[in-house]
Structure formats: C-alpha cells, structure tokens
Image: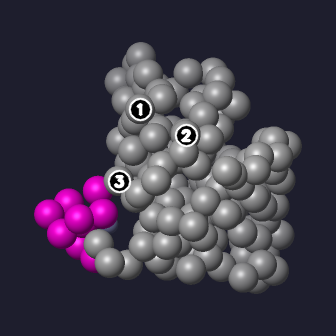
Amino acid sequence: MVKSFQVDHTNMKAPDIRIAEEIPVGRQNKIIKYDIRFKRPYKDDPMYPATMHSIEHMMATSIREISQATIIDFSPMGCRTGFYLTVLNPPENFISNDIKGAMIISLDMDEVPGADKKSCGNCYYHDIDDAKRELLDFLEFYYGIRLILR
Ligand SMILES: [Zn+2]
C-alpha cells in the first residue's frame, strides 16, 4: 500500500505538516514528500475546490521564489483536506522557514499567478480571497502568527 494511505486518517491533527514519504536518491540525495494538512478529515469541512486551486497556483509559485531547494511538486489532495509538497534535499529549516515564508508571500499576491487560459486548465475556477483566508488560518493555528490583511 502507498505509504501515505497507511496513516490513520480518523485521528489526524490539522493544521499540521508531516513527512509523508522519504525517498532516497542514490547515496547523497533524498526526496521528501510533505503532507501539509489544512483540515482534520471527518471533523472539519474540507476546502472548496476553487480555493484549493488558487492555493495550488499561489504556493507552487511562492515556494519556488523563496526556497533554495529544488521543488518537484505542490499539488492538492483529492480528499480536499490538504496538499502534498515534494522537494529534493530540503534544508533543515524547510518547514519553519521556506513553507512559512511561501504562505506569507502568497498573501501579498493581488492575483492568482498563472490563472490564464494558456497556463491553466480551468482559469475561471479560482477563489483568491478564500485561499488567503485558509492561508491566514494555517499561519495562525500552525505557526502561531496572526496576520491581518490590508
Ligand atoms: Zn490551474
């Protein structure tokens, strides 16, 4: 069974970030797949798909802006409770610095990056305001940073 299916989803903390999978690449390198959980399965309402679509675009962009590590993928979970972030050789402080920073700079975006017909498969299906609300909640209840948007 796929590793991320093996954790108990009936007793999951959220917001939370955990390592879902660690894949060694040769002797020197490793790929880490993070589970960035926004919602507790079966306890919280899942996120709206349009909200997740915007978070996907915003975080996929901002994590690459802020991080020195090679970002392989940032993608939504089909169950709509979180995202997977896959990274090659993340630094020690990747969760406390890079992911947090990416969330903070996402809040500064005035529009969803790549939300045009050429770059996206459904560019009318976005909700940037709700995406920012979810990111604000994550920052407050996971990182303990209370931010107020202008
Ligand atoms: Zn898209």
Image point 75% across, 58% down: which residue?
137
Q: Which residue matches tag 2?
A: 105
Q: From the top left corner, tell me how far across and down residue 14 is, in percent.
A: 78, 61
Instruction: Look at discs 1 and 2 and give the one toward the viewer.
Output: 2
Q: Which residues are magenta?
A: 114-122
Q: Amino acid at mark 3?
A: Pro
Disc 3, SS: loop
Q: Amino acid at mark 1?
A: Glu
Image point 39% across, 44% down: which residue?
61
Q: Main secondary structure of the magenta part?
A: loop
Q: Which residue matches tag 1?
A: 65
Q: Residues within 10 Å of mark 3 (few under 14, many from 20)?
A: some
| Circles 1 and 2: CB atoms closer than 8 Å | yes
Residue 24 occupies quadrant: top left
Q: Residues within 10 Å of mark 1 (few under 14, many from 20)?
A: few
- From where the camera sits, is residue 24 visible? no
